[in-house]
Amino acid sequence: MKKKNKKLIDKKGLRMDGRKPDELRSVKLEVGILPNADGSAYIEMGKNKILAAVYGPKEMHPKHLARSDRMVLRCRYHMAPFSVQERKSPAPSRREVEISKVIRDSLVPAIFVENYPRTGIDLFIEVLQADGGTRCAGITAAALAIAEAGIPMRDLVVACAAGKVDETIVLDLMDTEDKVGSADVPVALMPNLNAITLLQMDGILNPDEFEEALNLALKGCKKIYEMQREALKTKYVNLKEVEEQ
């Protein structure tokens, strides 16, 4: 359960960073920034700065982890020791292990894993700077990295969260809102298929509040999805220009 909230929304209805309740943080997306990876992406979402890299598909090692009917996606979400104000241990924490599984499970439905039996892909998500909502930002970047690696996908996966702050449902919680607010609802979506691949809730919401938060998070996902598509388009437009030169 979240801690008892303090005033995070002023009399004008603006949040601590000047956003309206239904407003996203600024988002920056780049694709193909790590030459040694098969696919990579970088996201800035507010003060979050996150790298995602994909390697594969390749023969699965150790072999006993291979599946005869599908590809295995291995995911490692990690926060750099310097990503938060108080230095964290570089060793994987229980939270990081849990989020790694959550991210993997949110991405697998979008990938044609049956096309690559007995193979695996390794996904690495490195949080360079954290300010709340890193799992959602990580999913968004990871989907771009997978797409850039040329791995067939049913759709991109995009993620965003909504929550409750000062009795108000707000979009895309930053760190302070996440820690002090009443609830947090991360959502991942395949927009073209209108399919939710991740839905969690931390805190307490009544049914009407939950529905409002879910709908707001879905709207946020669709806005970021357009940015994902534009980032991929920019990548390949640039490649075409280089080839023509």
Image: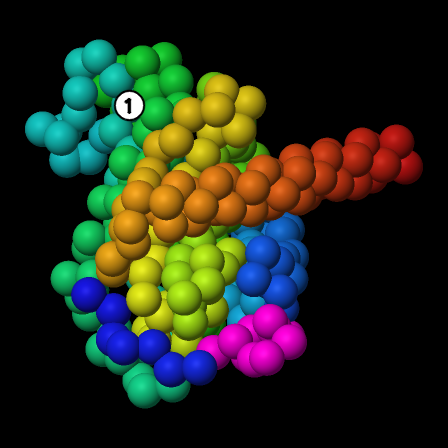
What secondary structure predominates along the stretch shown in magenta?
loop
Q: Please, which residue is most extreme toward the right here?
A: 245
Instruction: Tell me the quarter of the picture where residue 208 sits.
Output: top left
The span picked out in magenta is 8-18
Residue ID at (38%, 82%):
6
Along the line of sight, the residue nearer the viewer: 19 or 72: 19
Tell me if 210 is positioned left or right of 102 in this view.
right
Q: Where's residue 69, x and y in %? A: 22, 12
Q: Where's residue 215, x and y in %? A: 48, 40
Whether residue 16 appears in magenta in the rendering, the answer is: yes
Whether residue 112 appears in magenta in the rendering, the answer is: no
Residue ID at (61%, 73%):
14
Residue ID at (56%, 74%):
15
Name the residue type under label 1.
Met
Q: Secondary structure at mark 1?
A: loop
Indicate the quadrant containing the C terminus: top left, top right, bottom left or bottom right: top right
Q: Which residue is mark 1?
A: 71
Instruction: Tell me the quarter of the picture where residue 233 sits.
Output: top right
Around disc 1, counting alpha carbons within 10 Å, would you say few (fewer than 14), some (14 to 19), or many (20 or more)?
many
Residue 213: in sight, yes or no? yes
